[in-house]
Every structure is written in structure tokens, then in C-alpha cells.
Amino acid sequence: MSGPVRYTCEKIFRLLDRYVDRDLSGAEHDKVLQHLDACARCASEFEFEVSLVEDVRSKLSRIDAPAELLVRIDTLLRGSNQ
């Protein structure tokens, strides 16, 4: 009998944006989380992705743009979190 199927680094890289956006099924989320806990390389990439999104959000609050545009951008950055 084989153990649980583990995701490869390649699979994690393909799913990372959806993981950051919280757009994965429960099972996919759990497998990505397990991989990130065990793989320093992928965990580092995840931290970079999160910091990039946070940096963009921070900069959005400092630019002078129409409110409607800022709302649209923020909505896109949040993905399906709403």
C-alpha cells in the first residue's frame, strides 16, 4: 500500500498563485501546506509571493488614482477572497 500522494516542487509552483489567493480546494490547500512545511525552496518562493502582493497593496494606498480604479485593482489582488 502506498502513502499519500505528495506534490512536487513543479506542481507547487503552478499552484502557488492560487494558494496565495486562497483559491484551492481543501485537499489541494492541505497538500500545498504540507509541501511548504517540508521544502525550504518552495516556502521561500511562497514568502516572496506574499511579500510582493503585500507590497503592491501598500503602494496602492499611496498613489493618487481614481477610487474606482483602486477598488478594481484591490479586488483583483484579493482574487476570490471576497
Image (cartoon, rainbow, N blue to C red):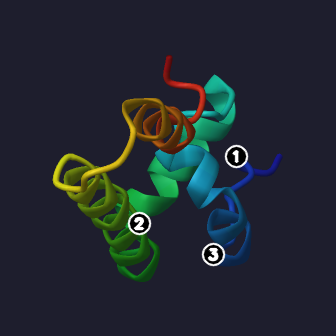
Name the N-terminal-most of marks 1 and 3.
1
**Marks 2, 3: nearer the viewer:** 2
Task: Classify residue 52 as left or right of residue 80.
Answer: left
Name the N-terminal-most of marks 2 and 3.
3
Label drawn at residue 49:
2
Label 2 secondary element: helix
Q: Mark 1 points at which residue?
A: 4
Amino acid residing under circle 2: Glu
Q: Tell me where residue 4 appears, x and y as whole percent.
A: 70, 46
**Closest to the observer: 42 or 52?**
52
**Residue for point 59% across, 26% down:** 80
Q: What's the distance in space between the residues labelled 1 and 3, CA to CA?
A: 16 Å
Amino acid residing under circle 3: Cys
| Neighbourhood count class around disc 3 (C-alpha, 10 Å): few under 14, some 14–19, many 20 upward | some
| Neighbourhood count class around disc 2 (C-alpha, 10 Å): few under 14, some 14–19, many 20 upward | some
Name the N-terminal-most of marks 2 and 1.
1
Amino acid residing under circle 1: Pro
Task: Classify residue 33 as left or right of residue 48.
Answer: right
Q: What's the distance in space between the residues labelled 2 and 1, CA to CA?
A: 27 Å
**Residue for point 50% across, 60% down:** 35
Q: Name the residue under label 3.
A: 9
Q: Are marks 1 and 3 in contact (CB under 8 Å)?
A: no
Label 3 secondary element: helix
Q: Is residue 45 above or below residue 31?
A: below
Q: What's the distance in space between the residues labelled 2 and 3, CA to CA?
A: 15 Å
